[in-house]
């Protein structure tokens, strides 16, 4: 199993550009989520999904859209990038009903918005 | 709202000593607390979970305690090694479902040889 994969690893955008961060998992996990990590702020939840077709907002959803058309994929869209969205983005997945609810994280995408 | 706080941003200890990291929470006791390790440039990796009705959980050189009276979880690494140097995150989950985790800001541990 590849686990949780994220692409790209690095990205530089100009203010106002749009892009999609890709996240995929091959563990058949129901639950997927997106976090951003900033120095001194820790991991903050952006959006999450408890299964295909179901998404919900986390702590910092503004400026981001998600969709979950399949169990495997959970892309994060930035519609109009802003410098405040410069961050490291992590995707995570977890099996529904797991007694540990252990989160499996991807390697991250480092995004810079100029 | 519920908060998870890791009071120490950084902790330096000598190799061979026991490292103790603290995670405090406000308000209500979470059903679970999880601990993760994060190395630079990588995603967090799950280490241990402790339930609110458990006082202690062990895994090799790791030990986690949960004190609902103090509203605190302690994470211990015994016989610490330089390879244990990393950032350790605690995360709170308010109930037994798949509700989103809320993470503390982490404690950066440096084990000095």
Image (tube, helix red, strand yellow):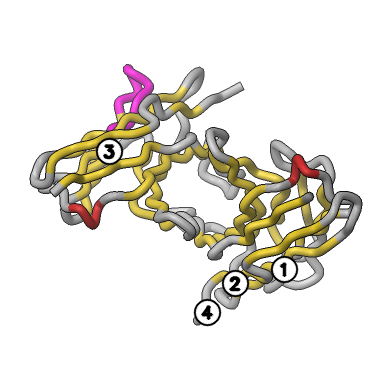
Residue A21 counted in the magenta span: no
Q: Quadrant of the N terminus of chain B?
A: top right
Q: Which mark is residue A5?
A: 2
Instruction: Locate residue A27 relative to residue B56 in the image: left or right.
Output: right
Q: Earlier in the sequence, mark 1 or mark 2?
A: 2
- Do callouts 4 and 3 point to residues on the same chain? no
Going by the picture, which residue comes out furthest to the bottom?
A1
- Residue B34's image quarter? top left
B90 up-or-down from A12: above or below: above
Of the pair B57 and A40, the residue shown nearer to us: A40
The answer to whether marks 1 and 2 mark residues whose Cβ atoms lie closer than 8 Å is yes
- Gap in Å between the C-alphas at discs 1 and 2? 8 Å
**Which residue position is annotated with label 3?**
B75
Taking the spot 73% from the left edge, 38% from the top edge, the residue there is A60
Instruction: Locate residue B97 relative to residue A101 in the image: left or right.
Output: right
Taking the spot 41% from the left edge, 29% from the top edge, the residue there is B6
Report whether residue A18 is seen. Answer: yes
- Gap in Å between the C-alphas at discs 4 and 3? 30 Å
Numbered disc 3: what chain?
B
The answer to whether marks 2 and 4 mark residues whose Cβ atoms lie closer than 8 Å is yes
The boundaries of the magenta stretch are B67-75
A45 up-or-down from A109: above or below: above
**Which residue position is annotated with label 4?**
A2
Q: Say which element carries label 1.
A: strand
- Gap in Å between the C-alphas at discs 3 and 1? 34 Å
**Which residue position is annotated with label 1?**
A22
């Amino acid at each position: 199993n590849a686990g949780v994969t994220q692409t790209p690893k690095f990205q530089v955008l100009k203010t106002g550009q749009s892009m999609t961060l890709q996240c995929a998992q091959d563990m058949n996990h129901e639950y997927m989520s997106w976090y951003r990590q900033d120095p001194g702020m820790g991991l903050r939840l952006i959006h999450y999904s408890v299964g295909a077709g179901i998404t919900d907002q986390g702590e910092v959803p503004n400026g981001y859209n998600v969709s979950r058309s399949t169990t495997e994929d959970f892309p994060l869209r930035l519609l109009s990038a802003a410098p405040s969205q410069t961050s490291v983005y992590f995707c995570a997945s977890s099996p529904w009903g797991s007694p540990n609810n252990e989160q499996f994280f991807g390697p991250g995408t480092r995004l810079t918005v100029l | 709202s519920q908060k998870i706080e890791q009071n120490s941003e950084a902790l330096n200890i000598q190799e061979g000593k026991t490292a103790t990291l603290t995670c405090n929470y406000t308000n209500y006791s979470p059903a679970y607390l999880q601990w993760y390790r994060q190395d630079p440039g990588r995603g967090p990796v799950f280490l241990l979970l402790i339930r609110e009705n458990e006082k202690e959980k062990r895994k090799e050189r790791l030990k986690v305690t949960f004190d609902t009276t103090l509203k605190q979880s302690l994470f211990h690494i015994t016989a610490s090694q330089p390879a244990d140097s990393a950032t350790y995150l605690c995360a709170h989950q308010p109930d037994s479902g798949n509700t989103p985790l809320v993470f503390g800001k982490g404690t950066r541990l440096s084990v000095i040889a």
